Image (tube, coloured by chain):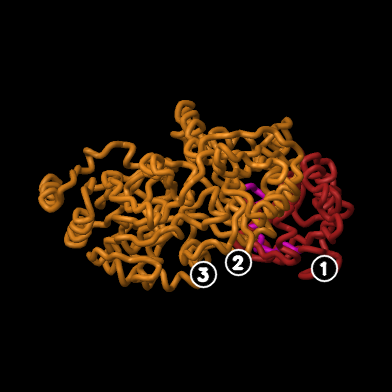
Amino acid sequence: MTALKNELQGKVAGSVRAGAEVSPAQTTNFGHLFHSTPRLLLEPRGADDVVAAIAFARAKGLTLATRGAGHSQSHVGLSDGGLLLSMVSMGRVLGVDADALTVDVEAGIAWGDLLRHLEPLGLAPPVLTNNLNVTVGGTLSIAGIGVASFRHGTQGDQVVEIDVATGSGDLVTCGPDREPDLFWATIAGLGQVGIITRARLRVRRVKPMTRTYYLLYDDARRFMEDARMAMDSSRWDHLESWASPSPQGTKPVNGRRQVFARWFFPFHPTVEFDAKRPPDDAALLDGLRPTERLYVDDLPTYEFFARLTPVFDLWKRGGTWEHVHAWTETVMPWETTPDLLDALLPDLPPSILVGGHILLWPAKGTTSRSRLFMRPPGENLMGFGVLPAIPPQFWADAKPMLDVASRLSVAMGGKRYLSGFVEFTEAEWREHFGPMWEPFVQAKRRWDPDGILNPGFVPLDARRPVAAPTA
Amino acid sequence: MPTALRFGDPAWCEAVRAEVNASSEYRNAAAKWGVGFNGNLLLAFEGDAMLPAPLHLFLALAEGRCARAEFVPGPKYPEAGFALRAPFSLWREILERRTLAATAILTGKMKVEGDKLTLLKHAGANRALIHCVASVPTEFPPPR
């Protein structure tokens, strides 16, 4: 082991650790469902290190996995006996072009760190994830969605160009109009064809303040009518919503009494504004019919971007951050979303959401060009997510329920969002990617001919089976 | 411990009907089942190594109640709005609570006839129904 470590160390500028020296946190991810120890871990210092690591892995017959902030939940960001690249060591802002409205970053930078760099310039990426501690390279490899996706698509749609270290050993600059096949196989490509080392991202000028209206609905269908109106109105910069339980007592479910809830639907449309020109509340809310208007929140825009950080901090302090996170997220057809809610919510125990929540994000199917971010056809879509934090001792009870939720959402025409816990068979993977499956397989063969990159999740390489959870 | 009833006997059918009608779980979960559509259900137990000949259980279901339960000639039954078909061995796994009916349906192991979306939308009603059927003490036929 020492010889192998020393050999790699001799080829790279970043630091190399042997498996026994890897911290326990780096042997699992946010899902806490998989536990794998790499043979070697590299903290690359730059793209040259990444290219050298790929060459090393190919020469030694090792697999190579990449890890950003480790916020995935399936067998992603983990390595079982291979070489693991911890990309957070590549976290620099390389330059901002305020005229062209772009920023160049290394792929391991967290979105929150990028925002801190952009704040003095009054700039921000058009789409931000709720959790700002995840990395640019990580979310671009999944798609990257947020509360502004209904306007701006995915984070992957806001990429001007990227540098990709391919599994075949090349460092290639690509974009939507330059090597587009590699670009679109990398964006939402689960790290299967290459490793993003640099990204040039679009940014936009933000207004200094936000106003968020806390609207509450007691009916899913009425909420959805208003959400669609809000999307179509062009009045709003951000739209966020949930299903929120009000526990009502216990009822039998399969003969065992469990807590059940009446569900409500909070809807938070947000508009950015200049302090000297506050928004016209009546004009903005015209036509919306919430059951109740609870609260109006004015926040500096950069605080709005980080609005969930206190919630995540609470989860960490409360211990639920360390629980099993088998998040079941699906992009649903608009039309079947109410049916899915009817089917799932009545039997969903609110306790499963301690340290978690149920997302309902209205979205437009027309805002993304990403080839591998699979979504149903249709103009209006709904992001639906059951995001529980499950104590490990309850995982066996919760898993069948989440499995049914996942399958039900797919049966109703949804496409799973792949950052959560996904346990597809190969047939289900093929169904997920549909007509993009074969091009994805071909891209894998072309740019990762040895099949070394990020094994254990999507079975593009039949030699490497999908990993089973160990939790 | 109640006496087990032989699977396939009229007495077993009657016990299923009684169990459904006594269940507040089913009454609540299925309050909208069969409202505006034909909610009558045919459970088709296909013959296999564990069942010598197929059996077809017809359940007349609406608004959380079961008006009739009887074995009928199969494989189709005109009064049924939906049919669930599976080999008996799978049904037995479901009725012994080793497999979820929803999982069997969603993985395609159990075939659905009728509007599948309506069936899926009323997942709670059908889960509660299966629970009722599984709650009847049953003597299953010995394997062949």
Return the residue at label 2: A377
Residue A401, visible in the rendered structure: no
Decide: marks 2, 1 in contact (CB < 8 A)? Answer: no
Expressed as whole percent of the image width and height from the top left, the position of residue A283 reads: 71, 46
Which residue is pictured at 57% across the width and 37% down the height? Answer: A276
Expressed as whole percent of the image width and height from the top left, the position of residue A415 reads: 56, 59
Q: Is residue A135 above or below residue A184?
A: above
Which mark's residue is nearer the viewer, 2 or 3?
2
Left or right side of A120 for A337: right
- Magenta residues (range): B83-98
Q: Report which colour depicts chain B.
A: red
Amino acid beneath label 1: Tyr
Return the residue at label 3: A434
Q: Secondary structure at mark 1?
A: loop
Q: Is residue B44 magenta?
A: no
Return the residue at label 1: B77
Q: Secondary structure at mark 2?
A: loop
Chain with colour orange in the figure: A
Looking at the picture, do discs 2 and 3 lie on one chain?
yes
